[in-house]
């Protein structure tokens, strides 16, 4: 599914400000890591976008909205893909877009060591039509008009009603790994 019209409508919010960032999709990635049926499972989503309003000097007005076309997910295993996209999974037919919308962004010390500053974005993550509170922890480096962020959201799938009885404890916790590059 191509949700470009939805993204375009979200991004048309008026004139760009100095703290508005444009996602560099070619340099950015949205991935997942979990353990399913005793094996490490790594996947990625190829169709995503974000609206980013961020100025480290004005966190009170910072906002991040990320959208992912869940039908673009690929684990490299057709059976896992089918389960992930099916009615018991992300339910891509009825809920093709997952979203994260921040409510607050604050400085943090929750990041692993690395370059840049650490932040936490508290907001709502919506998966399979079910919105739940979530925290995006990310490390951000800004060099002139280019920003690079690496972040993590931990998803407890039961909290979103994802997975059937057949799944048991498989993929009980999923790490959503973000590598975002943007320009202004």
Image (cartoon, rainbow, N blue to C red):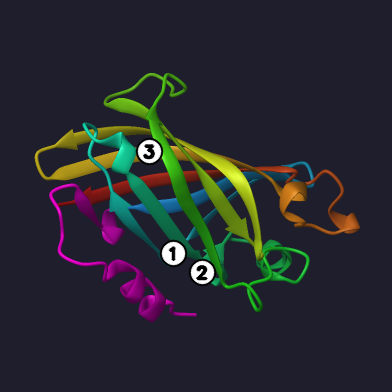
Q: In this view, does 107 lie to the left or right of 128?
A: left
Q: Residue 150 carries which label?
A: 3
Q: Residue at x 38, y 50 (%)?
A: 64
Mark 1 vs mark 3: give the one in front: 3
Q: Is residue 181 magenta?
A: no
Give the CA separation, mark 2 to mark 1.
5 Å
| Circle 3 residues within 10 Å: few <14, some 14–19, many ≥20 | many
Question: Mark 2: which secondary structure?
Answer: helix
| Circle 2 residues within 10 Å: few <14, some 14–19, many ≥20 | some
Residue occupying the far left of the picture: 144
Residue occupying the far right of the picture: 165
Q: In this view, does 6 lie to the left or right of 27?
A: right
Question: Mark 3: which secondary structure?
Answer: strand
Pinpoint residue 153: horizontal percent, then vertical percent.
54, 41
Q: Is residue 182 left or right of residue 157?
A: left
Pick the residue in front: 99 or 71: 99
Pinpoint residue 45: horizontal percent, then vertical percent.
49, 61
Question: Mark 1: which secondary structure?
Answer: loop
Which residue position holds label 1?
46
| Badge 2 vs badge 1, beta-carbon distance below 8 Å | yes
Q: Write the start and end of the magenta stretch as one range.
A: 1-27
Precedes in sequence: disc 2 or disc 1: 1
Q: Residue 72 carries which label?
A: 2
Give the CA separation, mark 2 to mark 3.
21 Å
Q: Does the magenta stretch include residue 25?
A: yes
Pinpoint residue 123: horizontal percent, then vertical percent.
51, 45
- Determine the image quadrant of residue 90: bottom right
| Badge 2 vs badge 3, beta-carbon distance below 8 Å | no
Q: Which residue is drawn at 42% across and 19% down?
A: 109
| Badge 1 vs badge 3, beta-carbon distance below 8 Å | no
Pick the residue in front: 19 or 170: 19
Pick the residue in front: 140 or 20: 20
């Amino acid at each position: 599914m191509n949700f470009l019209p939805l993204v375009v409508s979200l991004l048309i919010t008026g004139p760009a400000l100095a703290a508005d960032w444009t996602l560099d999709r070619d340099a950015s990635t949205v991935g997942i890591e979990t353990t399913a049926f005793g094996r490490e499972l790594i996947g990625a989503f190829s169709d995503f976008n974000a609206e980013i309003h961020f100025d480290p000097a004005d966190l009170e007005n910072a906002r991040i909205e990320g959208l992912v076309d869940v039908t673009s997910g690929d684990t490299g295993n057709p059976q896992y893909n089918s389960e992930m996209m099916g009615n018991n999974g992300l339910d891509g037919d009825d809920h093709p877009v997952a979203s994260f919308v921040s409510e607050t962004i604050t400085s943090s010390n929750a990041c692993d060591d690395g370059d840049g500053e650490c932040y936490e974005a508290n907001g709502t993550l919506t998966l399979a039509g079910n919105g739940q509170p979530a925290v995006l922890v990310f490390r951000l480096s800004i060099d002139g008009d280019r920003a690079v962020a690496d972040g993590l959201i931990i998803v407890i799938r039961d909290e979103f009603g994802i997975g059937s009885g057949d799944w048991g404890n498989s993929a009980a916790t999923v790490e959503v790994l973000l590598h975002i590059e943007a320009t202004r």
